[in-house]
Image (cartoon, rainbow, N blue to C red):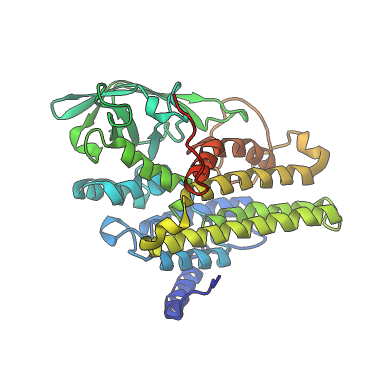
Amino acid sequence: MDLRFPSHTADFRNRIREWIARELPAGWGPGMTEAQRRDGGAAWSQRMHATGWSCPTWPSDYGGQGLSMLEAAILDDELEAAGAPLLSPSAGKLLVGPTILALGSDEQRQRFLPPIARGTEVWCQGFSEPTAGSDLASLTTSAIRDGDDWVIDGEKTWTSEALDADFAFVLARTDPDAPRHRGISYLLVPMRQPGVVVEPIAQIDGTAGFNRVKFAGARCPAANIVGAPGDGWRVANSTLTFERGTNASTGHRRFEVPLQRCFDLARSTGRSSDPVTRQQLARAWAEVNILRFHDYRAMTASLHPEHLAAHGPLASCIKLYWTELDQRLSELALDLMGPAAVVLDGQAGDPPPFGVGMGRRPALHDYPAGPAQLSFLFSRSGTIFGGTSEIQRSIIAERVLGLPRETRN
């Protein structure tokens, strides 16, 4: 495996390195306070959005920088080397944006992509329902054409960011007489309108990370359908591919912080010289780097789509790996804390949770968990959203190992 970047990219790397050094928030680096980290991270996020670096591979017409996948990977390399703040993941940037870019109309790209890149419009995902989770094709939310609009009725659940969202990308049944995979459409629905009710769902840590969204006569312009009516299953599978791991070639970077915090915990608890602990940390380091190699495989597949089939179901492989790695790292952090791990000692000024979730959320009731505890709790959801680990294993078994398809009713 040759992990070297081509020599012709050296000038680009140098320019990026100089730009990051100029633009990093003043005082950013080791020893900063949590307030400096918070304020500096917010300033960096605004700067990245304002200059088109938040979505670097998107064309400049849509708010990006027009970088190649290779250049974007170099950018991420240099951001990691400089310890630059990580941008918060969002459904707009990671899921619906790439879907609109790949499958949307020119009008949809012009309307929706620039506000996502600038961070001025927030999106949420309306896929799962109370009775349609892993079996998404059984969804019952309906959309009926009424003049220039679709009228939507139904309920979605486990919807992250719905309280703040301006739009939702929603799967709804537009042809109840068609086979269940063919009567679904992919709609870009305004959230701030009559007929849309958002109800927070308290998570186990007391925060409002997820929501229940009820549609009762909500309206969506007919121009906001991605693809053709009834083509939503194909479009949704593109979104799920981005969610499961091929929306970036450098997802391993989000595990560098929790890995480093495990090292710090081992030192602060006096366990860094224990042979068993050292073996656990070495394994964790190796697993994060294995994810890095998976990410490079995804980048290679994107650069050479003619050979994509040779890489197998990459999205399922990466999604299965990173979500279970997230759980192992969070479990290791609690193990390193020892008996203190069962004591709720979270404080208002704590650093963000260790894992790759959405950061701190509003509290619905008091549950003062610390960062490692919050990361552990949130990591449980990773092997469920975007397709469970069982589903990913079934896909890999069928498409890589050639095992017979699971019997479905």
Q: Work out which residue is located at the far left of the displayed protein and give it.
A: 147
Nearest to the observer: residue 120 or residue 162: 162
| Residue 357 drawn above or below residue 45 | above
Q: Position of residue 135 (x, y in %)?
A: 44, 28
Residue 105 in sight from this viewpoint: yes
**Could you say where residue 391 lies in the image, as x and y percent from the top left?**
51, 37
Q: Nearer the viewer, residue 119 or 91?
A: 91
Please indicate whether residue 177 sits to the left or right of residue 355 in the image: left
Q: Is residue 159 left or right of residue 342?
A: left
Q: Nearer the viewer, residue 267 or 245?
A: 245
Residue at (29, 60) in percent of width and height:
59
Q: Position of residue 168 (x, y in %)?
A: 35, 35
- In the rendered image, which quarter is residue 320 located in? top right
Q: Residue drawn 56% across and 61% down?
A: 293
Q: Is residue 379 left or right of residue 276?
A: left
Image quarter where the N terminus lies is: bottom right
Farthest top residue in view:
216
Residue 126 position, x and y percent, is 38, 32
The C terminus, quarter of image? top left
Q: Is residue 361 above or below residue 22?
A: above
Residue 293, above or below 111? below
- Looking at the image, how many numbered discs can be counted on the residues? 0
Looking at the image, can residue 191 be seen? no
Q: Is residue 366 left or right of residue 223?
A: right
